[in-house]
Every structure is written in structure tokens, then in C-alpha cells.
Amino acid sequence: MRPAYSVVFLTTLIGAGQGLFVAAFMAEAVARLAGESVPTTFLVRASIGIVALGAGGLVASFFHLGRPERAWRSAAMWRTSWLSREVIALPAFIALAAAYGLLHARGHGGTFLVGLLALAACIALFTCTAMIYACIRFLQEWASPLTFVNFVLMGCASGFTLAAALAAWQAPALLAPFTTGAIALTLAALVSRVASLKRNARLQPRSTTQSAIGARGPDAVQKSRGFTGGSFNTREFFHGVGAPGMRAILAAFLALAFVVPVALIVAGRDGAGPWLALAFAVQYTGLVAERWYFLADARHPQNLYYQSVA
Amino acid sequence: MDTSAPRTQAKTTTCYMCACRCGIRVHLRDGEVRYIDGNPDHPLNHGVICAKGASGIMKQYSPARLTQPLRRKAGAERGAGELEPISWDEAMSMLTDRLARIRASDPSRFALFTGRDQMQALTGLFARQFGTPNYAAHGGFCSVNMAAGMIYTIGGSFWEFGGPDLDHAKLFVMVGTAEDHHSNPLKIALSKFKRSGGKFISINPVRTGYSAIADEWIPIRPGTDGALLLALTHELVATGLIDREFVARCTNAGYLVDLDEASERHGLPMRDAAREVEFPLYPQNHWWWDEATDRAVPAHATDATPRLDGEFMLEGKRVKPAFALLEERLRECTPEWAEAITGIPAVRIRRLAHEMGTVARDQAFELPIPWTDAWGTRHDKVIGRPVAFHAMRGLAAHSNGFHAIRSLAILMSLLGTIDRPGGFLHKAPYPRAVPPSAKPPNGPLAVKPNAPLSGPPLGWPAAPEDLFIHEDGRPLRIDKGFSWEYPLAVHGLMHNVIANAWRGDPYPIDTLMIFMANMAWNSSMRPEEARRMLNDKDANGEYRIPFLVVCDAFQSETTAYADLVLPDTTYLERHDVMSLLDRPISEFDGPTDSVRVPVLPPTGQCRPFQEVLVDLASRLGLPAFTNADGTRKYRDYPDFIVRWETEPGSGVGFLSGWRGTAGDRSLKGEPNADQWARYAENNCVHHTKLDPSMQYMRNWNRGYLEFARDMGFRKLDNPLVIQLYSEPLQHFRLAAQGRRPGRQPPEHLRERVAKYCDPLPFYYPPLETQAIDRDAYPLAAVTQRPMAMYHSWDSQNPWLRQIHSHNYLFVNPLTARAQSIDDGGWMWAESPWGRVRCMARYSEAVEPGTVWTWNAIGKAPGAWRLAPDADEAERGFLLNHLITDELPQGGARISNSDPVTGQAGWYDVRVRIRRAGADEPEMTAPAFAPMPALPGTRSRTPAWIAYFAGRKKST
Amino acid sequence: MTQLALVIDLNVCVGCHACVTSCKEWNTSGDAGSLADLMPYGKDPSGTFFNRVQTFEVGHYPETQTVHFPKSCLHCEDPPCVPVCPTGASYKRAEDGIVLVDYDKCIGCKYCAWACPYGARELDAKQKVMKKCTLCVDRIYDEKLPERDRKPACVLACPTSARLFGDVHDPESEVSRAIRERGGYALMPEWETRPANQYLPRRESAPCDPPTPSSSSPR
Ligand SMILES: Nc1nc2c(c(=O)[nH]1)N[C@H]1C(S)=C(S)[C@@H](COP(=O)(O)OP(=O)(O)OC[C@H]3O[C@@H](n4cnc5c(=O)[nH]c(N)nc54)[C@H](O)[C@@H]3O)O[C@H]1N2
Ligand SMILES: Nc1nc2c(c(=O)[nH]1)N[C@H]1C(S)=C(S)[C@@H](COP(=O)(O)OP(=O)(O)OC[C@H]3O[C@@H](n4cnc5c(=O)[nH]c(N)nc54)[C@H](O)[C@@H]3O)O[C@H]1N2
Ligand code: SF4
Ligand code: SF4
Ligand code: SF4
Ligand code: SF4
Ligand code: SF4
Ligand SMILES: [Mo]
């Protein structure tokens, strides 16, 4: 597939936002259990960050549409379409996160309840986003539980890294849990991402030129796709990056999204805010590369029909 | 819905996105073309349409349309495309003055050559009336071998004159055909044939298009079909799988041939001087040797059966039946011999021959149709032999094509499939005499100032006396047609006109008028040379070809070289006729002609070339176009079409339908003023269905022969005996051997004429193969017609060019890998005459000794109003750069054409291929300077279009 | 329940592209129109087409089969492209099984195109909405057209009548019979989209004799 940057930013931004929320809300939850409290400023600032990231993702998503002015229509088919469901889940999550921050800011009660609802929305959103890809059965690289696991772990990892950075300023007490969490989640994400890479490398495409045209012989080869210029099908489904390029991008995101951030977090463990901020910036960049790779990596069966010009 | 809303209307006319001429319905909405579909009530295409026909909209609204007459700017170079608009009045008077001057001095200094049109009855008449012999259409570089090879044998031919009867055939063998003129009808017939269980065999070095759906594909090396066909005939004769009775009665197989070495009629059939003959032009006074009575009897005697073998004495001379001579010729032509030449295994050749022979014999059938033959014998049935053939340029476009096609015609004749159900069927006005009676002018006196030509410029020579030469043998036509170099050049040699005129050989000309031909590009061999010659000046700075007039509808490559450009209408904007006097759309079962009527107003100042010719002829006062008092005779082209007759009062004119003052006569009758209206009301077509008794065996069918004479298809009604053994060719050979009184070829041509004017078919390697180092150029290179493109003219059609915006050279992987050329990689193809850089495409569907590409896809930058960096200019290429129009011969040069007919040897070119260097630009070569937009074409072409006819939907 | 569809006979298709351009000309001025063409006179021209005719080669010389392969929306009975559509612009008609796009609802998110394994959908570059074969729904029910013309443009155009049109749920229809008798098959059965369009295979051809290696040229 040819990755759309709108989609890359949508999924990475909201992922980080969701992760940040999970971090913040878990902090509050754990604190409540321990009868302690989390500094409000932290929770408010975090909420602002969550809303900003969510909104950023929302904005990015509009760039994906041919007819953005009609975007409102896209909630209609929530019964069948994961995309439609995401369209509902995302604003819901943003709204609840905003309410969560607002309640804290105003010092109202009920934050925990709203937080629980936001958490539900957050999980729903993770599910929708992942399922948009995982539900297309013939995009075999995507059609796997690992897609969901990866989206969750990477979102949370980047969220926790950001939370740690914030904590360095706002809530030093939370540094330890957040950095440990960030490191743990990043390593977990690495493991599951590598697992999905391994799986995809082993994949046997179920569709072949034979099944595409129903040819008897084993050695069917396309000579002409039927036109010599371009078409939507040749633009949308081919990323046009050669194997070496893909390998470079793979190496880059493994380093930037996982290895380097862990090192930086370790470096900033004892409160060096800049290091942690840098860790998030690097990790986010890495995740952008990862998401690009994730999208590009899928070999669409339609491409069998667009192999040769003559 | 818009198809029905009152603002939409449908008009019928005839398509001209190609020469097939299907009936179409043009649906208009608010005066714009909504869509074009096939006319279900049309006999040719029965409602279907093709990729081109369905894209007519984009042709009509093309930005490359020429919309006003143009003149080359004073001082501008030809080819620079610097032209300026002028008015029609200026253009016409400029032209009239010039042509009048030429006509008053030496009419042959005006040359008129036309390309893809099918209005040769009019253009030919104009040339004849003007008095110039220098006229021809594209046939010479197209498929004249097909026409000549078959018409000189059976009096009819494939192409537009006859075809395979797939309704009755069981076995269909297609040789060297990709698309052909009979585009939709052949496709319709082919699928019907396959679905009714017929077996379809394709003989072709390449497997695409039709060949793709063949039940059997027989790859063959280009230029070797003659050998295959002779070997097949050898097998049929050897195994006795021939229709002896048909061969004996309907061909000249039994004619006794004079073998007396001393005789000046050596090798000619003996004639009975004593017998009085019905048709002096085609005297039927030959001899047979009767089997029963074992003596010579008049040929075709109803009670006799001719011996086809043996040797006899007649009038004191050694004689043999023509068939015996053919048999001797075939003796050497074994399948093993052919295998070495064609690459087709001998076993397969044997099996193929056996299959043809047994299907023709064992699956023969009868139609209960009574008819009477030319010799008066009544028959109560017609016999069908269900083996049909079709062939086109794969056979024709070689310098050995004439004899290859003669071989095919003879094979078909021996199988007994000529004008019989299930075999080959003629289309009116064919069959014609073998050869037809029309002759070209035959000497310098034919051309006189201010006078029409003595006869039609083109004809059918039967002997050296019919050649159009000076007494010393020098050619009299600018293209050297009908000279000793190409005695049977029945369609002329358009591909040599530019070079000859440039060289002033045989003589210089003043004005060259080109209509509907892109001679500066895809219809020239070595277009770079042609372009140089068109732009070349002599010592005193005058152009070697002083005046060039181009009539075209689009900004072709050639328009850049014109001194005067006449903007034509499109097929949707003009009247036009597909006349029985020319190349009609006749069906097997009867004469059919059709017309075009305007469905849209002309664009800009466009004027139909038909109108221009009638106007020009009137201004020049050409007799046929002027009244006795010198006034203009015809108001316009439609008026001319209605009123003109072959002879005053003949009742035969351009159109066969609704003749007679009451409009109730077909084929023959007084002119009818309402004729156009009747055609318009009747799907623009008129079909005369022949009585079944006249639908078959027409070469020898008395009823039909008389009908054809009465309707003016022919002058006589003599039987058209198949010439297995060609008398005309033997006349030329005798002259070359100096055995015959009268005209003799110049010394340097004696050997050539004697060799190639062989009364019996034979195989020889193409002239080019003989002239070059074969091992240095190991591969044959050919082109094919893409079904979705018409020559050069569809590159300005956005829908069609998306299918073929550039082309690849198809190479068998074995061949490509041997040169380490990658699939899709850049490569060079080099011939002794030129080289092109292009992209390779591996293909398992091409014979490894052959490479091929689609024809006419590459374009000069800027031409056709395409962007200079369009695919056509940067990645598309012409094979023409590799093909030569002339071959070295001794010190001199000779046209790269068939030595009998002058057919251009397009498919004889041989090449070597190599990988292009990594440092080379990924661009086709040779490259050409961009061509500017001509005035009147759309100055800026849009970056996108979203065509929607008429007012937008209110949604 | 009716399921209209095309059945394409690869045994007679000669790859002429008549179905391609007649589809384009009908639809660009029809309900689905206009269909944009980018760079119509320039480099890499590209446009919206509902039907493409492709060429494949099967086997090795000289046993090569050249297969011309027309491809348009297959109007799947279980169309993955429909449920994924967030707006409901993509839908499958209950009455005749035609899969359509409502161009007024479509937001051009391309998700349905991702969800079509056959590459049958094309986003119109100018209108920015998803388009595809409509089975000429604006022809086949048009009472004002003569009965004979109430068929898809590509079907009427096809010179070899390789394109059969009808109800594949009616066992007696021409298309159902063709599928039964000629071994009609579906594309990419592995995805269980149950395409309504089916293809009729090539009739097996006679094998050829061993070729003699092609020498350099005719002797
Ligand atoms: N390499 C190679 N070269 C070949 C061939 C081949 O097989 N291989 N084939 C040869 C053969 S058989 C032929 S017939 C020639 C054909 O070659 P040409 O005779 O040159 O035919 P086209 O290129 O189709 O078009 C000629 C001109 O007709 C113009 N035209 C189109 N419509 C109209 C109209 O309505 N009115 C007027 N006045 N002009 C119009 C076009 O703009 C174009 O400039 O090519 C020959 N060249
Ligand atoms: N769509 C479309 N239709 C057209 C035209 C067009 O440009 N486009 N042009 C029209 C014109 S002007 C003409 S003359 C006709 C020509 O009609 P065709 O003769 O069908 O046209 P070509 O493409 O020249 O086909 C030549 C075929 O012969 C094969 N061939 C080449 N050399 C040999 C050989 O030595 N032996 C054998 N057995 N086969 C050989 C080639 O592979 C090719 O398949 O088409 C007409 N119809
Ligand atoms: S075959 Fe030729 S005449 Fe017939 S529809 Fe196609 S382009 Fe027109
Ligand atoms: S129109 Fe018919 S024959 Fe031509 S490509 Fe389409 S399906 Fe094949
Ligand atoms: S072919 Fe593609 S677009 Fe058409 S119905 Fe099937 S899945 Fe949908
Ligand atoms: S592109 Fe249009 S039809 Fe396709 S899924 Fe999006 S909204 Fe639906
Ligand atoms: S059915 Fe109509 S829309 Fe579909 S491919 Fe054929 S012509 Fe195009
Ligand atoms: Mo031609």
C-alpha cells in the first residue's frame, strides 16, 4: 500500500494521546488506592496534552478525505464499519479526556468516574483504530491480533514516555513509575512488533496471478495491465520504495521507536526533563516511521492486476 | 433519463475511426456528442462497435484539430511548423493558379497521393481529369501484394474484396493477420465460428489478438510463408487431397502449355487461332487433352475431362498441361525443405496439409441451389468445402509477398474453396477478370497539356505493352510504377514518391498534394530521410520538391512541412460515400454501399476535402466537372455524387441505392435528387441481396456474370478462369528473355524480370535478406496493428492514448537474455539502415527469431498537440527508423519492394539488439525537435478533462 | 432474489478494448459521470475507467497461451467493500444485487477501495468520490431505450459477444447456463467474496509438435 501521511499522523498522534491518558489515569487510580493524590497541575496539563494530541489526529484525518465537508456523514454506519466506529470513539475520547481535565482543574469530584468512562472510550478507540486494518482479511500483514496489540503497546509506550517528561516538571514523584512503565511498554512493544515482522516475513500470499485470473497453467505472467499511463490503482496501492529503502526504514524505526528512547529514558530517569522530552520526540519520530512501514508493508492482492505495462 | 429527454437525439451515419466503416448511431445531447454506439440495423457490424469507434468523441473535440487554412510563413523553413492562417479564397486561388499553370505545361508535374481514405473513385477521377498519371492511394505501401497476388490468380482477393465464409467453414486458417480492415465483422464471425465448434489455426510469428484465441498457434519465421504454402500444396498434391474436378473445370490447370524452346509463345498456353472467340480481350480458345478420347479438344468442352499430367504433341509442338508444370515446380518443395526455412517441423506441415485436405474432402456439403455455369451446364446444387483462409499483411508486406500470396491462392484453389460455401467468397464488384480489363496509360503520349489522361492512372497490366514507360524503358510515373522495375504496381508506390521527387528521378515534379497520409512520419520508411528530403533545397536555393500541399484534419507531423495546409472536416461533419466504384462494404451475398452524412456542423473553417476537390476541378475547368459552356457543373460534392455517371446515361454512378427518377432502382438507374435523403433514412447503407443462384461460383456463374456486366461491375461476362499458371507473368518473362517481339526490359533489369515474373509461384528470401549480412542481423522485426489505435491518428485521443501512450519491443526471453537485456529495460535495436533506443518487454508469445512492436505509437514531440514530453515522444518509438525504402543494387539503388508489384517490404527488416548503456538517458532515440502549435489548433491543452455532454445533471 | 452480473468468455475475447472505451463514453456523460482524465495530452495520462482489459501469458514458447482479461467490478454477493464504508455510500441493492456508490454521500475516504481485493474501484481524481462499474444501471432499466438496448454499454459493444449479461440466480438464464455448461469460475475464490461476475475458461487447444530451434533467418 502507499501510506497516507494523514493516516500515519492520525494513528500515531491519537495513540500517544491515548497512552498519555492511560498513564495519567493510572497514576490517579493508584494514588487513590494508596490514599495519596496526584498533583492537579500535572493531571490538567496532561489532559490538555491528551486533547491536543487527539485533536491533532482528528485534524490530520480530514486530510485523508476527498470530500472533508461531508465528514459528518461518516458516523452513519457504526453497525458495520470500524472506520465509522472510530469516527465516534475519537471525539468521545477527546471529550471525556477534556471533561476529565476540566473536573480536575475546577477541583470538582467525579473525576474518577469520568476517568473510567474515558478509559473505556480509550480502549474502544484503540480497538477501532486497530480493527480498521485488522478486519481486512486479504491484507494478510494487517489481519492479525498483533495489529491490535501493537497499536495499544506503541500508543501506551509513547504516552508513558511523554508522561515521564511531563512528570519531570510537574510531578517528580511520578517519575519512577512512568519511566519504568515507559521502558517496560517500549520493550513490550518492541517484542510484539518484532513478532509481527517475523509473522509477516513468513506469510504466504494466498492470492496469486493464477487465482487472480483463474489461469490453468502454473506460470501465468501479466504482460499488460491494460493502460500505459497511471491510474488510481497504480497510485494508491504501490509505495514505490525499493527493498533497500524498506530495510533502511525498518532499521530506523526499530532504533528510533524502541532502542534509542529506552536509552534516553534511562538517561533521564532521575529527573532530567530534557532527556525525557528528547526521548518522546525521538520515539514519536520512530513511531511515524513505524506506521509508515506498517501501512507500506501490506501487499494488496489487487496489485496482481497491475504488474506490467506494454 | 438523458438518453430519452427531448434534448437528446440520435443520428445514424458511418464510422471512420478506421477503414472498416461500421454503421454508427451518434447520440447528441444539447448538440454535443453524448455517446456513439454501433447501429444494430447495419449489415456490417450489427450494432457492435470497437474501442476506436467508441472514442470518436475525443477525436471530434481534439485540440489538435486544424480549423483554418494555413500557409508557410515567408522565409520559414519547412518542418519548423511556422505557418500562418489564410482565407479559403486565398488558398483556393493560390492552388488553382499553380495547378492551372502545371496543367497547361506538363500535368505530370502535379502528384496526388492519398493515405487512409477510401474515396479513390473521386481522387482517381480528379487526377485523370487533371491529366496526371502521378496518382495513387496508400495501397502500394499497404497490401498491394494481397490484391495483385490473388486478383491475378482468382479474380478477387482478401482485403476489402472478399473473405472467409465462417458461417459454413469447419476449419479456419488465418495467416499473418492482426486486425485488418474488416475489424468488427471478422471478430463477430470468429466468435460465432469458435462457438459453433470450428477449429481456428493461426500462422503468425506472434500470438496476440485473434491468434490468442486460436485453437492452434503455428509460429513461423517472418518472410517464409511462401515456403510453407508451397510445401502444404506439395503434400496435398502428393496425397491426392485436391478437388480434381474443380481444378480441371475452373482453373487453367488443363491448358496445354507450349514447351517449344524456339517458340516466341514458349511457356504460354496454346491457342486455337482457328476458333472464333467471344471475347477478344480474353480469348477462350485454349486446348485441353481429353482423358477419354486421348486427343486435344477445346478447353472447357462440356463433354471432356482434361489430363492434368503427361506430355503431348500439338500442332507439332511439345505441350504439357499447366498443372503438370506446377507439379514439377512443387516436387522440390517438400515439408523437410520448408522446415529448414520456416522453422515449422515437417511432421506438423504434413499434419496441417492432411487436416486441410481431409476436412475439405470428407466434410464437404451441398446447398440445394441450382445455377448454370458459363459453359451452359446446369447444376442443381452448390458444393461447399468447409476450409476457409484469411491472410493480410503478414503475407503481403514482404518483397516476396506476391508469390507467397499466389501460392496461397493456388492452395485454396486446389482445395476447391474458391467462391464456394465454407471457403473464400467474393464481394461485389469482385470477381473481376484475371487480370481486370482496365489498363494504365502505356506511353508518353498519354499525358498532354490541358487534357485528361487517356485512361485511368492505375490499371492491370497483362503484358509489356501495358507498361507505362518510354519506348527505351524509362519509367513514366514518379513512383516508377508499371515500369520494368515493378510491372504489376497496380496500386502505385507511394513509399517512393518523396525520394524520387527529391532526386528528380525519373523527373522532378512541381506540386505534391498529400491527403490523409502522414508521410513525414509513420507511413514513410526512414522518416528522418523523408523529412530531410522534404526540406532540402537545390543549388539555387529552391526546394527540390517546390510545393507541398497537405490536407489533414489534425496537426500531424507532416503538416509542419506543408507550404499549404487545407483543414479537413471529421467523419462526423461531412458527406462521404463508400462506393461500388471504389472499395464498398459489400457483403458476400450482394453489393452493399454506404454513406456518411454530417451529424455535426464543421469545426472552425474546416471544409471537406471532397468539396475542395469538386471546387478545384470546377475552377480548373476539368471536363467532367464543367458544362459545355465552361460553367461549373456541380453545385457541391453531394450534387456531384448524385448526378455524376460513369458514362452519360449509363445509369451507373457513385451510389447504388434508390436510383431512378422514382428512387425505386438499385445499382443502375437515372440519377435521383433524393438519393442522400433516402440513404439518411435507411441507416446510410444500401444492400442489394443477390438471388441465391448468383451467390456462389461467381467466376463461372453465367447468371452472375451477366448480372455483373449489366450492372456495370464489368465490361464483359466472360468466365473468370483461375490462373494457377499465370499468362501475364510469362509474357513479361518472355520479353526479359528476349524471346518475344515488342518491348524489352533494359539490360540491367532483364535478369530480375525473368526471375521474378515466373508464371508459377516460387519461394525466395526477401530482397533485403539477400542484400545484407544475415548473420550480423539475426532477428526479424515486425509491427502489429493495436486494436485500440489507428495508425498515427489516435494519439490525440485521450481515451485511446491511455491504452497505448508508448510502446515496447517484444522479445522472446531466450533472445533477450542472450543480450542481457532486462524485461522493461532500455535497449537498442539496430538494422543496417538505422537504430532506435526503446524499452524491451519479454514475451513467450513471439517466435525467438522475431521481435515486434505496436505500429505508429511513437510521435514527434509537440505533434498532435501532445506535450513535448508526452510518453509518445519520450518512450514511444517507430520501427520505421529501421526500415529502408531503398536497397543497394550494384552501384544503383532499387526500391525495397516486391519486384513484381512494388509492395513495400515493411516486414523484411532484420535487426540485432543490445542492452542500452547504464550511462544513456532513459529516452527513446532518435529524438526530434519539438513542433510548435499550429494556428487554429487549441493553443493551450488542458491539464485535465472531465467530459460530460450537454448541460450538467442537476443533482 | 435477482443477482445481475456479467459472465466473460475468455475463449473468444480478443482483447480489443471495445468494452473499455464504450464503458467510458457511456458513463462519463451518464449518472456516474463525469469521469476525469488527468494529463490527457501530456506525460503519464491517467483517467477513471470502470473496466480494463489486461493481457497475460501462460506457459512457455511455443506452448504459450495469450489471455486477454477484462476486469470490472464483480458485484460480489458478499462484498467486503460495502460493510467497511462509514457513510453508507457503498451499498448493494437488494432488488438486483448491483453494488453501487452514492456519489452524494461518499466522502472519498478510499476505505472501500482498500477493502476490494480486485482493484475494481477508482477514486475520481476530480470529483474526489469513489467510482466503479454500475452495471450500467442507468441503461438497463431505462424504459425509454428500445428493449434491445437495455443492456450494459460494454455488452452491446463487444464484437465477439464475449460479455454475457443476466441474472446468475435464475438457473435458466443465459448466464447461468453458460456458467454450468462452460465451467464458469470466480476470481480469487480464497477470499469468499462470492463474485457475481464469472469467467468462462479457454477451450483447451491442440498441443503443438516440438519446435525446431529458430535459426537466424530464412534461407
Ligand atoms: N512500421 C510500419 N509502418 C507502416 C505500417 C506498418 O505495418 N509498419 N503500415 C503501413 C500501412 S499498411 C499504412 S496504410 C500506412 C498508414 O499510414 P498513413 O497513411 O500515414 O495513415 P495514418 O497515420 O493513419 O493517418 C494519415 C493522416 O490522416 C489524417 N486524418 C485522420 N482523419 C482524417 C480526416 O478525416 N481527413 C483528413 N484529411 N485527414 C485525416 C491523420 O491526421 C494523419 O495525419 O502506414 C504504413 N506504415
Ligand atoms: N485497429 C486498427 N485496425 C487497422 C489498422 C490500424 O492501424 N489499427 N490499420 C488498417 C490498415 S491500413 C491495414 S493495411 C490493415 C492491416 O491488417 P493486418 O495485416 O492484420 O495488420 P498488421 O498489423 O500489419 O498484421 C500483420 C500480422 O502479420 C504478422 N506477420 C508479420 N510478418 C509475418 C510473416 O512473415 N508471416 C506471417 N504468417 N505473419 C506475419 C504480424 O505478427 C501481424 O500479426 O489493418 C487495418 N485495420
Ligand atoms: S471497426 Fe473501424 S469503423 Fe468499425 S467501429 Fe471500429 S473504428 Fe469504427
Ligand atoms: S469488447 Fe469483448 S472482445 Fe473486446 S476486449 Fe472487451 S470483452 Fe474482449
Ligand atoms: S469487486 Fe470489489 S468493488 Fe466490486 S463488489 Fe466485489 S469487492 Fe466490491
Ligand atoms: S470512499 Fe466513499 S464509498 Fe468508499 S468507503 Fe469511503 S465513503 Fe464509502
Ligand atoms: S457494465 Fe457498464 S459500467 Fe460496468 S463495465 Fe460494462 S459498461 Fe462499464
Ligand atoms: Mo494499410
Image (cartoon, coloured by chain):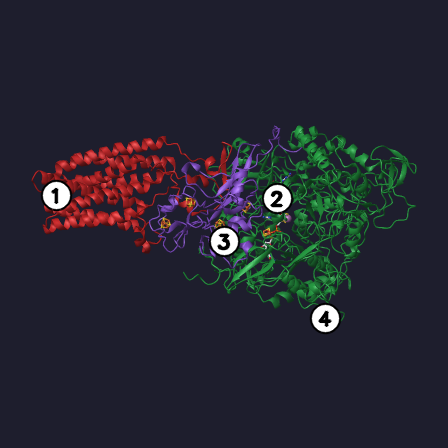
Chain A as rendered: colour: red
Closer to us: A284 or B471: A284
Q: Answer yes or no: do the residues labelled 1 and 2 have beta carbons within 8 Å? A: no
Quarter of the picture holding the N terminus of chain A:
top left
Crowdedness near tag 4: few (<14), some (14–19) or many (≥20) residues, C-alpha within 10 Å: few
Chain C as rendered: colour: purple
Element under disc 2: helix
Q: Disc 4 sits on a residue from what chain?
A: B
* Residue shown at the point (52%, 64%) measured from the top left: B31
Q: CA distance from mark 3 to mark 4?
A: 57 Å
Q: Answer yes or no: do the residues labelled 4 and 1 have beta carbons within 8 Å? A: no
Quick check: can you spot residue B54?
yes
Crowdedness near tag 3: few (<14), some (14–19) or many (≥20) residues, C-alpha within 10 Å: some
Element under disc 1: helix
Label 4 in the same subunit as label 1: no
Nearer to us: label 1 or label 2: 2
- Three-letter code, disc 2: Lys
Crowdedness near tag 2: few (<14), some (14–19) or many (≥20) residues, C-alpha within 10 Å: some
- Say the numbered circle drawn on residue B200: none
Nearer to us: label 3 or label 4: 3
Q: CA distance from mark 3 to mark 1?
A: 70 Å
Q: Horizontal and vertical percent for residue B350?
A: 69, 30
Which residue is disc 3 drawn over? C140
Which residue is disc 1 drawn over? A169
- Three-letter code, disc 1: Trp
Which residue is disc 2 drawn over? B192
Q: Disc 2 sits on a residue from what chain?
A: B
* Residue shown at the point (45%, 42%) measured from the top left: C195
Closer to us: B6 or B51: B6
Q: Horizontal and vertical percent for residue B380?
A: 79, 45
Which residue is disc 4 drawn over? B631
